[in-house]
Amino acid sequence: MDSPREKAKSRLKGICLGLTTPFLEDGGFDEEGFRKNIEFYIQNGIKTFVVGGTMGEVTALSLDERKHVIRAGVEQSAGRAIILADTHHVGNINEVIGLTRYAEEVGADFAYILTPFYWRPTDRALFEWYKTIAQSVKKIGIMLYPNPWRTNVRLKPEVIRELLQFKNIAIVKAADPDVGEITKLVAATRGEIVINIGWEVHALHAEALGISNYFGIVGYFNPEFERRYEQAILNMDRQQLRELHVIQQPLRELYSEIDAPVLIKECLDMVGLRGGHVRLPLWPMTDDQKRKLREVVKDLGTKVLDE
């Protein structure tokens, strides 16, 4: 059996998607729709997913719902895709450990763990946080997820370097809007663990540094486009990259205007996948926003349902 680091290095390549959690009109989890979406992505060549994460409206899910989403994702992928299960908590380490053990029990490949936030943890506190979690599980790999843009907490490269002594820590997500932080992570990790790119716009810079996986923004509703972009990055096809990179800019601008789960769910509904409702504090898009999004999606070569 591969170690978590071996598995990450051999299988975490190309496009990752943070899956949305579709909700029914009565507010319940639409498991059928969730499984349908996963199957569509796998059949269209996308095989790395975060379940129950930011795009999945994690803060609006109960603990039981988080477990339900993780289990459904593992079951539907059935070993055909890498499942990163979001197990973070704002500051309750026992809940993180319990959910990470659950993810391990049901067969998730990695636990996707955001830095604790709200408080201002010191470097030593962050080290002890991840150390305690890593030592609490046996088989599942750990993905460090620093996202200072959202949390205002920075997991420094030197702390990450110290955490590498725990061999089940296998991935670190680069989700800092400062592209220079990617180079710092490369220097700190020295190829011992996988770096994952959280900002699609940084994927080109990352590939030049030997990093070959990133979170896409088009693959949710147009996997064919995303696969073309992935291949252009891997091949460093400059002509294709200029075209495909630039044409995504209107969508990137909408991502900065509208919370991503709201936008993605609307896109999914447009193409006949399961988007569904969002939960408060998120709110549906306006009609003007929907019209603008529809044109952007169509300009990316996507077939949409008739209005």
Image (cartoon, helix red, strand yellow):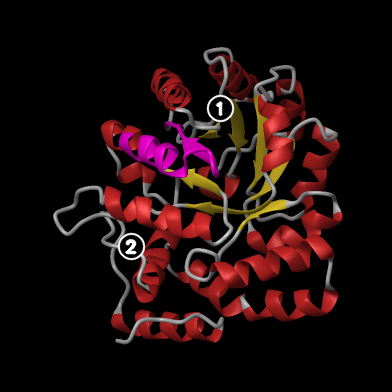
- Please state which amino acid type lies under the numbered disc 1: Pro
Residue bearing the label numbered 2: 274
Residue 21 makes an appearance in the image: no
Residue 216 in magenta stretch: no
Mark sitting earlier along the chain (2/1): 1
- Which picture quadrant has residue 1? top right
Q: Is residue 239 left or right of residue 197?
A: right
Inspect the image, locate mark 2, and give the three-letter code of the amino acid beneath it.
Arg
Q: Nearer the viewer, mark 2 or mark 1?
A: 2
Compared to residue 39, the image places residue 223 above or below, namely: below
- The residues bearing labels 2 and 1 have C-alpha atoms spaced at a distance of 38 Å
Q: Is residue 268 visible?
A: yes
Q: Which residues are magenta?
A: 68-89
Element type at mark 2: loop
Question: In percent of the image, x 36 and y 50: which residue is there?
Answer: 35
Residue marked by disc 1? 121
Q: In terms of depth relative to the viewer, which is nearer, 120 or 157?
A: 157
Number of residues whose C-alpha sits closer than 10 Å to that of mark 1, classed few (under 14), some (14–19) or many (20 or more)? some
